[in-house]
Image (cartoon, coloured by chain):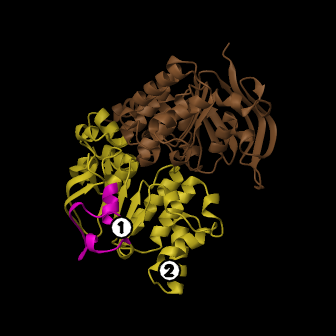
Chain colours: A yellow, B brown
């Protein structure tokens, strides 16, 4: 299911235009990170894709569907969205019920709901916390719970808004493993992130937004090397890019392992 | 001799209704003007330590407490919260929870703490205006705090606390919602604050690269206990940080791989960009 965004403009009111003439084609199975400064329009773009917002101008197509013509509930069948702030998303009184809610509403059988829920909770490591109240979890775990709630819906497209915020290294690895698993399943993964080391390690394509416009779109290995362009969007390159450039070496490495391998082959 | 601002001795705490200790047997002395980075996996007790150092424990969060807890040379439990409020300030992890909700505009939100401390009107206006400028909130001064983006709300949460000019500032993941440039500005302004004043800062963060640059001392908290403390390079290169879930900077990780691949002995592992460039120069 491809995402096709044409000439998308979104104005919140007469003074605030969050997106201006955005064109993006995201083929099925793409693994894409959207980066840029606060207020660049990243979350607005994500909410356009999942239909929470409708275009002021332009069109957003998900496969053969046009988001302007569908309710967010219908779009939720194809697009799962984990909010930046998990507390805007969580409402059930038990962890397990929070995760079950999505697949139940998508009409899956009770056996499927149970399986999807168990697998999603195991993927984020919350399988032992099923009976807890979501607000008895730490913020980092509430964030993981909001990801599990999206995973359980088995949508072909998933959007994670700042998934690594407040997470320790172990949890970031866990989220990375989830992304790799989703990629292997051929699902489209979109993240919004300020964590450039995370983007470099797990995402092949990077889109840079600045003041509502796309200023770069391409392979991570190319976009994340453009230090001057990134600076105009308040983005600092990943640590390994800064290290390579500090050594006068024009090489992109997404992970320390890639960095060392390239260094040894140099 | 530098004054000790905060002192915890054999300090343990469990929240009311919880059977487990969130932090235990903590022995920690914080000197005036220090910038201490606190690291640890999720659930290690970092925020609880922040609450103990700010006086929220025992004045706001109740529970079972043992050991000794002193702030500014006085027993915390014996010092009224109103007195502590003027001297300690804490920015909590989730900025959405920090906004008071008691005021209608960004400007009023920044002034709220100062009003409660009974600050003189003229001084209050001056401090509010300076703080709004410093945190790039001046153009948003008449907006509702709830209309702001996550990053803007985080700036507001920081501004509201810093306007009160606390002697001891506790920042719990203060840049989680900020873009990298915004995060850098916050870290730099906090660093400048400790360089140019006697303000003491406890900075709880997963951003190891930044702590490596700015902290005088790093404290490692795992399962409620202090498992190490010392200078950034010494602490942040310890191999135990990986299994504890804290991780390392990308510089340290790459250098660790290089060290294990090298036949000859390698210099100390790096934690900052400059150190990493020095480490890898011979490889290029």
Crowd around label 2: few <14 · some 14–19 · many ≥20 (10 Å): some
Q: Is residue A38 visible?
A: yes
Q: Which residue in the protein does label 2 denote?
A: A104
Residue drawn at x 61%, y 59% as measured from the top left: A135
How far apart marks 1 and 2 lie (CA) works out to 24 Å
**Residue A225 figure quarter:** top left
| Discs 1 and 2 share one subunit | yes
Q: Is residue A175 positioned above or below B209 on the image?
A: below
Q: Is residue B194 left or right of residue B147?
A: right
Where does residue A28 sit, x and y in percent of width and height? Answer: 27, 70
Could you tell me which secondary element the residue under label 1 belongs to?
helix
Residue at 48% x, 74% y: name it: A102
Of mark 1 and mark 2, the one earlier in the sequence is 2
Q: Residue furthest top?
A: B1
Crowdedness near tag 1: few (<14), some (14–19) or many (≥20) residues, C-alpha within 10 Å: some
In the foreground, B247 or B1: B1
Asked if residue A58 is among those painted magenta in the image, a careful observer would answer yes
Residue A213 at x, y percent in the picture: 22, 50
The quarter of the picture where the N terminus of chain A appears is: bottom left
**In front: B62, or A154?**
B62
Q: Is residue B71 above or below residue A73?
A: above
Q: Are marks 1 and 2 in contact (CB under 8 Å)?
A: no
Residue A32 lies in the magenta-colored region: no
Give the residues drawn in magenta, as a range. A44-72
In the image, residue A216 sits, relative to residue B4, either above or below, namely below
Measuring from the top left, give residue A192's x and y in whole percent: 36, 54
For mark 2, give the secondary structure: helix
Which quadrant would residue B152 be assigned to in this image?
Answer: top left
Q: From the image, which quarter does the C terminus of chain A lie in?
A: top left
Which residue is under mark 1? A183
The residue that appears at 40% across and 38% down in the rendered structure is: B142
Chain of the residue on which disc 1 is drawn: A
């Amino acid at each position: 299911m491809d995402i096709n965004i044409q000439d998308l403009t979104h104005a919140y009111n007469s003074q605030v235009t969050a997106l201006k003439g955005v064109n993006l084609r995201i083929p099925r199975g793409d693994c894409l990170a959207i980066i840029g400064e606060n207020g660049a329009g990243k979350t607005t773009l994500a909410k356009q894709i999942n239909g929470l917002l409708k275009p002021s101008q332009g069109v957003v197509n998900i496969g053969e569907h046009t988001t302007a013509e569908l309710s967010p509930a219908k779009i939720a069948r194809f697009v799962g969205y984990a909010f930046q702030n998990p507390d805007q998303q969580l409402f059930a009184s038990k962890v397990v019920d929070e995760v079950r809610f999505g697949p139940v509403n998508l009409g899956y059988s009770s056996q499927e709901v149970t399986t999807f829920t168990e697998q999603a909770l195991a993927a984020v490591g919350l399988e032992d916390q099923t009976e807890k109240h979501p607000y008895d979890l730490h913020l980092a775990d509430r964030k993981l719970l909001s990801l599990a709630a999206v995973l359980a819906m088995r949508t072909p497209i998933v959007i994670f808004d700042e998934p690594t915020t407040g997470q320790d290294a172990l949890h970031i690895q866990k989220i990375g493993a989830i992304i790799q698993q989703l990629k292997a399943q051929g699902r489209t993964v979109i993240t919004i992130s300020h964590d450039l080391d995370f983007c470099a390690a797990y995402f092949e394509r990077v889109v840079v937004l600045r003041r509502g416009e796309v200023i770069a779109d391409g392979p991570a290995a190319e976009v994340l090397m453009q230090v001057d362009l990134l600076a105009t969007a308040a983005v600092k390159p990943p640590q390994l890019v800064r290290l390579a450039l500090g050594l006068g070496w024009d090489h992109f490495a997404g992970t320390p392992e890639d960095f060392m391998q390239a260094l040894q082959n140099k | 001799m530098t004054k000790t601002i905060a002192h915890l001795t054999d300090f343990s705490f469990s929240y009311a209704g919880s059977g487990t200790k969130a932090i235990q047997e903590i022995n920690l002395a914080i000197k005036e003007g220090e910038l201490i980075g606190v690291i640890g996996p999720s659930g290690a007790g970092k925020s609880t330590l922040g609450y103990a150092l700010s006086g929220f424990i025992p004045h706001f969060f109740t529970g079972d407490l043992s050991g000794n807890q002193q702030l500014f040379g006085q027993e915390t439990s014996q010092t009224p919260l109103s007195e502590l409020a003027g001297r300690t300030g804490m920015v909590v992890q989730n900025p959405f929870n920090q906004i008071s909700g008691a005021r209608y505009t960004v400007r009023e939100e920044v002034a709220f703490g100062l009003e409660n401390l009974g600050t003189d009107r003229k001084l209050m206006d001056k401090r509010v205006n300076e703080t709004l400028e410093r945190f790039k909130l001046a153009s948003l001064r008449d907006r509702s705090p709830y209309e702001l983006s996550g990053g803007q709300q985080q700036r507001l949460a920081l501004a509201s606390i810093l306007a009160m000019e606390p002697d001891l500032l506790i920042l719990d993941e203060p840049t989680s919602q900020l873009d990298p440039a915004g995060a850098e500005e916050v870290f730099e302004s906090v660093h400048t604050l400790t360089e140019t004043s006697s303000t003491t800062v406890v900075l709880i963060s997963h951003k190891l690269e930044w702590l490596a640059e700015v902290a005088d001392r790093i404290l490692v908290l795992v399962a409620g206990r202090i498992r190490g403390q010392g200078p950034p390079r010494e602490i942040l290169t310890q191999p135990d940080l990986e299994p504890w879930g804290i991780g390392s900077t990308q510089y340290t990780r790459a250098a660790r791989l290089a060290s294990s691949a090298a036949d000859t002995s390698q210099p100390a592992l790096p934690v900052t960009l400059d150190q990493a460039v020095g480490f890898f120069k011979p490889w290029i």
